[in-house]
Amino acid sequence: MQYSWRTYGILAGVLALSFLLAWALPTTDILRGIYGLPGIGALLYALYQVFRDHAAHERALALQRDQQHFVLGVTSHMAKVAFDKHAEFCEKYIGRMQSGLSELFARGPSSQCLILASELADIRLSFRAWLMSDLQEKILPFEEALRKVGGRSISLEGFKDEKQRARVLDEIYDVFDKIIGLPGQGKEIDKRVAPGRIMDHLQDLLGVKELCVLRSTLINEAIKTLERKN
């Protein structure tokens, strides 16, 4: 514990001088009592300062414990593994989704959407032990939309009636526009399905902003530690 030695030295000087004057000067008992008042005040303030230093010491210890727990949590093995798994999932899922979107732009809606949906689902399921349920709920609409387009594209081959085919085609292209992030005619983008929204969810999972803040905090703490040592 770090004491305020300068303050204690001043208080000790006041206390000693006060009692020395009260004891050495030839005066009445009343004046001796008055001379001794600063010494009593210095003694009381010294006790207050002791409690104050102790409280500051306890706060410093509590802060140090919190920092140790913080660093331990960040650097623990499971925390590293969990983050690495999240990063690997996001990299694979976004990579396949982006390449799939390029294919969709080139070919248009077709049964290939079923293959893309299946591959994305395989990636998601292979990491399901490391994914929060709320994230899976956010990306499922995208996969379901792909399946719908693929399934309806296959079923379109069985329709002979032109009106039925036109209705199914309108339905397919309506969902397809949502998948590639384009608003349908007179409609807004469905943010649950739009790929840009899905990427935002995956980036939130990685906590890029939080990691930047964390890195800055750790660097600042390391600098403070070096400055204290020097």
Image: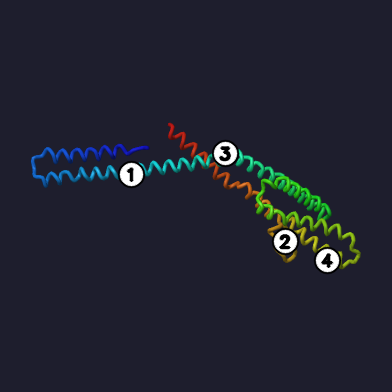
Q: Is residue 76 above or below residue 182?
A: above
Residue 167 image label = 4
Q: Badge 1, how many Cα within 10 Å: few under 14, some, many 20+?
A: few
Q: Which residue is drawn at 72% across and 61% down?
A: 183
C-alpha distance separating marks 3 and 1: 36 Å
* Element type at mark 1: helix
Question: Is residue 27 toward the left or the right of residue 117 in the image?
Answer: left
Question: Is residue 6 toward the left or the right of residue 134 in the image?
Answer: left
Q: Earlier in the sequence, mark 2 or mark 4?
A: 4
Q: Earlier in the sequence, mark 4 or mark 1?
A: 1
Question: Is residue 136 toward the left or the right of residue 1 in the image?
Answer: right
Tell me the residue that label 2 is attached to: 183
Amino acid type at mark 1: Phe
Looking at the picture, how far across and down is residue 111, in whole percent? 84, 54
Disc 4 vs disc 1: which is toward the camera? 1
* Element type at mark 3: helix
